[in-house]
Image: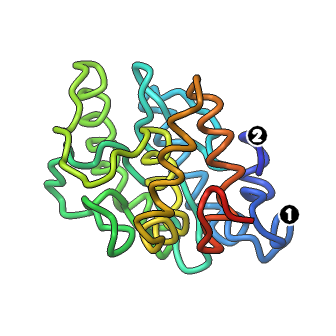
Amino acid sequence: MITDIEDFFSKGCGRCDRFATPACSANKWHDGLTGLRAICQSAGLIETVKWGHPCYMHAGRNIVLIGALQGDFRLNFFNAALMKDPDGLLERQGPNTRHPDSIRFTASAQVDDRAASIRAYLLEAMGYADAGVLPPKEAHALELPDELVEAMDADPELAEAFHALTPGRQRSYAIHLASAKTAATRVARITKARTHILAGKGANER
């Protein structure tokens, strides 16, 4: 996966063999992606790279992540349970997504058409970060590390594969990640485990 932000906009995320080719989704949606980037930067968000994608932060919190697929490109909001969505733009990324968290675009021109709404949504999310407001904790049978929840919010394919695992396999990852002493180690373990999760395997399976 890429670690340099400029690589995403010129080559892609580095997760598949379409990287740095004309077939890469980032190349297909280049104009729309750079439009989203400009809006995020103009809002005063800090630009970083996480999970191979542009991630925009404010007040020490992840606010949004930009992603590109073959059929569309997206602006994904973290802590989406807080968002009011007055313009009805947010969609669930998949059947296992708890809250509508993604603005989906199927044409680059839609970024300009929705620019005012996007800026308003970014300011709303930044306001929650400034105030330290978080969504209420939801009851789950399995307590997952924040890093895994954020990774799945940013990676719909990973989320679908994880939720398709048996409860025992899900628990194995929760235990494996909880044993890490730092957030950086947990993120590294998630990145390393991604292929295993997509293959339907538990943390201790080969």
In this rendering, the answer to whether 186 lies above or below 167 is above
Residue type, numbered disc 1: Ala
Task: List the residue tagged with mark 1.
Answer: 20
The foreground one among 175 and 96 is: 175
Point out the image quarter for the C terminus: bottom right
Q: Gap between marks 2 and 1, in whole Å? A: 14 Å
Residue type, numbered disc 2: Thr
Q: In percent of the image, x 56 and y 58: which residue is there?
A: 67
Q: Secondary structure at mark 2?
A: loop
Res 22 quadrant in image: bottom right
Q: Which residue is the extreme one toward the bottom?
A: 71
The answer to whether residue 108 shows anywhere in this view is: no
Q: Earlier in the sequence, mark 2 or mark 1?
A: 2
Q: Secondary structure at mark 1?
A: loop
Position of 122 compared to 128: left or right?
right
Position of 111 compared to 4: left or right?
left
Q: Where is residue 15 drawn, in percent x and y?
A: 75, 62
Q: In percent of the image, x 62 and y 47: which residue is there?
A: 190
Position of 50 compared to 129: left or right?
right
Res 88 quadrant in image: bottom left
The foreground one among 61 and 22 is: 61
Q: Which mark is residue 3?
A: 2
The answer to whether residue 36 shows anywhere in this view is: yes
Q: Where is residue 103 drawn, in percent x and y?
A: 37, 61
Q: In percent of the image, x 25 and y 59: which residue is there?
A: 99
In this rendering, the answer to whether 73 lies above or below 192 is below
Q: How packed is label 1: few (under 14 Cα within 10 Å), some, or many (20 or more)? A: some
Q: In percent of the image, x 31 and y 67: which residue is there?
A: 92
